[in-house]
Image (cartoon, grey):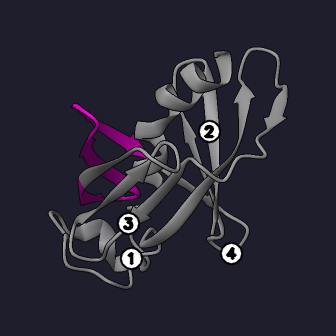
Amino acid sequence: MKNLKTALRALPLAIIIMFTACSGDDSKETGNNNNSTDKFVGKWKLTGFEDLASGNYTAIQDNRTVYEIDGDGGGKYHLSTSSSFDLTWENLGDNVYHVEHYGGDWTYEIEFRDNNNTIRIEDQDSASYYGRK
């Protein structure tokens, strides 16, 4: 139950991570919702959580929490194999994304790692990690 709560809290962060721009010029763009080359476009699977207070990382071996980010500003968030939600996103520039889904909207700065194959989204007390699927 704790992992589910943590996954739900980390969801908005993960979505924003998927929406970071690819080139250095993207920081000058706003409202870029038609960029199929954006490095966040693709499928992202939740891989783990980090407790910021302790620095402890917990790996997640679960293929059910997945974001599918489309290059047209849309996509899907899969919370389980039988539950998914539509989402919309907007690249605000400077690795900041606005994402709406699952009854809420969030704005996050995304950190790309490992040649853009891992994203890290930090919240108040934890960070969520997602890997390309």
Q: Where is residue 88 drawn, in percent x and y?
A: 21, 55
Span shown in magenta: 88-109
Tell which circle, 3 or 2, labels the residue nearer the N-terminal end: 3
Mark 3 lies on a secondary structure that is: strand
Alpha carbons under labels 1 and 2: distance apart = 20 Å
Q: Where is residue 40 drawn, in percent x and y?
A: 45, 68
The residue that appears at 25% across and 52% down in the rendered structure is 86
Indicate whether 5 appears above or below 36: above
Q: Where is residue 18 drawn, in percent x and y?
A: 44, 60
Alpha carbons under labels 3 and 2: distance apart = 17 Å
Residue annotated with mark 2? 128
Number of residues whose C-alpha sits closer than 10 Å to that of mark 4, classed few (under 14), some (14–19) or many (20 or more) = few
Alpha carbons under labels 4 and 1: distance apart = 13 Å
User: Which of pointers 3 and 1 indicates the residue nearer the eye?
Assistant: 3
Residue annotated with mark 1? 38
Looking at the rendered structure, the kind of residue marked 1 is: Asp
